Amino acid sequence: MSHRKFSAPRHGSMGFCPKKRSKRARGKVKAFPKDDQSKPIHLTAFLGYKAGMTHIVREVDKPGSKVNKKEVVEPVTIIETPPMVIVGIVGYIDTPRGPRTFKTVFAEHLSEDCRRRFYKNWGKSKKKAFTKHAKKWQDEDGKKVIESDLNKMKKYCSSIRVLAHTQVCFVFLNSFERTFFNF
């Protein structure tokens, strides 16, 4: 049948078009939930990887529907959430053009998994990332600088987020890269 497009131009939802490869492997958080001052300090997100899909049988609780109090089969996505390690904190101040980074303080001990993400080729590198920063935690002058940075963040910053990276070695994924994320 030539000229198929005239008799049946399209089947299916346009919601899934255009079909193309994603630009990034990891999802992007477009908006964090509004911060409630009355609640204690907590993380607002957690990093997970799509591991696959399956189905479940559940009872529908929807009054007025045909399937009310009946069992239906629905598809579900399985998300792997590897443990995360917090490696630093970032303070943000509000500007007319949006939040801007004010100060960043990294942890004293950063694992090799974390440091290797800062190099393009870890094998050929001298592996010197964050060695000067680690020395800052050892001497008294460095500790005073870090303490003053933390105090400035408490005083001036409108929001403080943590820098975290995943421990992918505990999850069976094709990727072995540790993913950095800002919560």
Image (cartoon, rainbow, N blue to C red):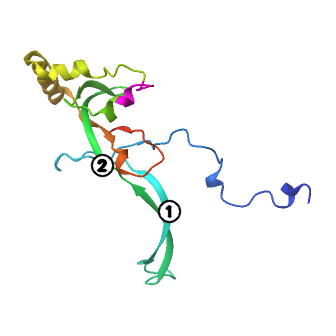
Spot occupied by residue 83 in the image (x, y as percentages of width and height): 30, 48
Q: Residue at x 18, y 19 (%)?
A: 135
Asked if residue 108 lies in the magenta stretch, the reply is: no
Res. 64 in view: yes
The residue indicated by pointer 2 is 83
Q: Residue at x 80, y 57 (%)?
A: 9
Q: What's the magenta bit mostly, secondary-structure-wise? A: loop
- Which residue bears the numbered disc 1? 53
Q: Which residues are magenta?
A: 116-123
The location of residue 73, given as percent across then percent down, is 50, 75
Identify which residue, 117 or 23, lies in the foreground.
Answer: 117
Q: CA distance from mark 2 to mark 1?
A: 21 Å
Residue for point 29% across, 45% down: 84
Give the structural element (helix, strand or loop) at label 1: strand
Position of the N terminus, as image quadrant, is bottom right
Viewer-proximal residue among 121 and 44: 121
The image position of residue 20, as x and y in percent, is 63, 44
Q: Among all residues in the image, which is located at the extreme left? A: 140
Q: Is residue 154 above or below residue 174?
A: above
Closer mark to the observer between disc 2 and disc 1: 2
**What amino acid does circle 2 point to?**
Pro
| Residue at 10 percent of width and 18 percent of height | 139
Left of 36 or right of it: where is 120? right
Which of pointers 2 and 1 lies earlier in the amino acid sequence? 1
Where is residue 8 shown, x and y percent of the image? 81, 61
Q: Secondary structure at mark 2?
A: loop
Q: Mark 1: which amino acid?
A: Met
Q: Residue furthest front?
A: 123
Residue 118 is one of the magenta-drawn residues = yes
